[in-house]
Amino acid sequence: MITIRHIERLWNAKVYAKLSHELLDTRQEASFAIDGVERPCFVAALAMIRMDELAQAHLPLYDTLLRVLLRAQERDGGWGDPATTALCLRALLLGRGQGDAIEAGLAFLGVMQKDEGIWASGPMRRMPADPAATLFILYQLGDNARFREAVRFSEALGWFAHGGSLLSQELQALYQWASLRWRSATVETGVDEQTLFAAA
């Protein structure tokens, strides 16, 4: 298990790829094969999430990581691509986070959501829809009410209900696993849970 001291040592040495690998090593997020995991904002978000899980968000390193995350936010409200934006938002939403950065990030995800309800892997809306990137986004934020209000959550889940049989076995397994994080949201959205999870 990675320690806070080890996180801080790798962060200060700017060994972002190694730190990202070690933070992802025991996490399900590693299964999603998302690009850009060595970017400082991605690594900072992962480290903040891990520090929060260890109840160590009070340490100075956490504030350093938070500043890096906020400085990396782009003018459009995102952090490059929808998946990285979702991870950064998850980190910022820890402890009931508030603020313009969160609102802008949620708006970015709302704008980037494609007509069919899912997201592309890249930073442009005209890129092809990507079920893996969408699963990553839903895993990170699907259990957050503010996210569900900012995007067309029911349509995203509905896409998997109707297109789930087209997914590879690996993506079907990720869908089943990721759905555990947003099951409670189905009651609030009025979506029939049996329909949503039939595809997986």
Image: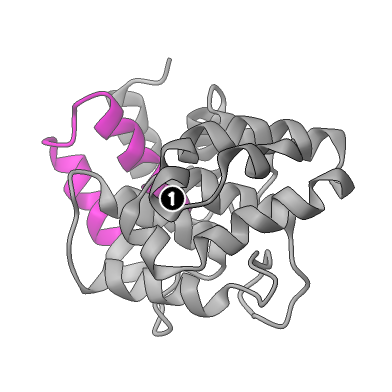
Judged from the image, the secondary structure of the residue bearing numbered disc 1 is: helix
Q: Position of residue 145 (x, y in %)?
A: 33, 54
Q: Position of residue 42 (x, y in %)?
A: 47, 52
Between 153 and 194, the residue placed more toward the observer is 194
The residue depicted at 37 percent of the width and 65 percent of the height is 149
Between 193 and 177, the residue placed more toward the observer is 193
- Any part of residue 166 in sight: yes
Above or below: residue 185 compared with residue 123: above
Q: Position of residue 110 (x, y in %)?
A: 48, 74
Determine crowd level at label 1: few under 14, some 14-19, many 20+ residues with C-alpha closer than 10 A. Answer: many
In the displayed structure image, the side of residue 42 where residue 65 appears, left or right: left
**Residue type at numbered disc 1:** Leu
The residue depicted at 72 percent of the width and 83 percent of the height is 126
Write down the residue under mark 1: 141
The residue depicted at 28 percent of the width and 32 percent of the height is 51
Residue range highlighted in magenta: 42-68
